[in-house]
Amino acid sequence: ALIAAINSHFDSVALMIDFYTTMGAKISKYKNPINDVGVTEVYGTDNPTFSVTYNGFVLEQNESVLTGTLVYTTDATASSDVGTYVVEASGLSSDNYAITYVDGTLTITQAEQTINVDSLTKVFTYNGSEQTISGATAQGAITYSPATVKNAGKYNITISAAATKNYKAATTTVEVEVLKANPEYTKPTGLVA
């Protein structure tokens, strides 16, 4: 009769399961464990390994009394755009617990942007005209300051790449040099001493 009474009591207990990752758990260690714990990843990286916390067991029981395999589902992948994605858990069952899953969230943040200057023209020769800086590449639109050089000397060029949906804005500085012109001297001809 006692076992039957305990089993009857278990039928009315809801087990709450919530997501977290190691980082998320540290951030949220003082929160109610059934609250949603959001986790983040940087654009272009694999999803983190998800874990869960449990709340609602009785008689000092734990997740070992559950059957099945915990499965996580989300639309987010390494190539997903920046944004917030729902993460769902499923797959566990119990004769004595009514399992309720609490959705988690995965927030993908902007990645750092790299400005490539390998093809940038870094040496010019003075020709009397403004010469345009060009050749840098990045995920975002490129601008140069200053955008042109003219007189002989060395210049620090600030290269900026605009932010995109998935990448942060970035800047870098490159030294560009304008060499002095070296005109050729042509010996006069036809002169008679």
Image (tube, rainbow, N blue to C red):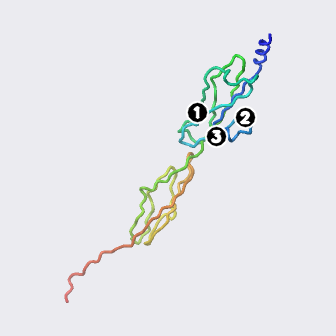
Q: Nearer the viewer, mark 2 or mark 3?
A: 3
Q: Nearer the viewer, residue 63 or 20?
A: 63
Q: Residue at x 43, y 57 (%)?
A: 135
- Tag 3: residue type? Met
Q: Secondary structure at mark 3?
A: helix
- Residue at which label 2 appears: 35
**Circle 1 or circle 3, nearest the eye:** 3
Picture disc at residue 75? 1
Instruction: Name the side, left or right, on which 84 lies relative to 173.
Output: right
| Residue 57: mark in rendering | none
Q: Which of the two residues, 124 or 49, is positioned nearer the viewer here?
A: 49
Image quadrant of residue 10? top right
Disc 3 target residue: 23
Quarter of the figure with the N terminus: top right
Instruction: Please tell me which of labels 2 and 1 falls first in the chain.
Output: 2
At which x and y percent is residue 163?
Answer: 56, 51
| Residue sticking out furthest to the top | 1
- CA gap between label 1 and label 3 equals 21 Å
Mark 3 residue crowding within 10 angstroms, few (<14) / some (14–19) / many (20+): few
* Left or right of 177 on screen, residue 83: right
State whether residue 69 is above or below residue 150. above
Identify which amino acid the numbered label 1 is placed on.
Answer: Asp
Assign the C terminus to one quadrant of the image: bottom left
Closer to us: mark 2 or mark 1? 2
Residue 147 against residue 86 in the figure, above or below: below
Mark 1 or 3 closer to N-term?
Answer: 3
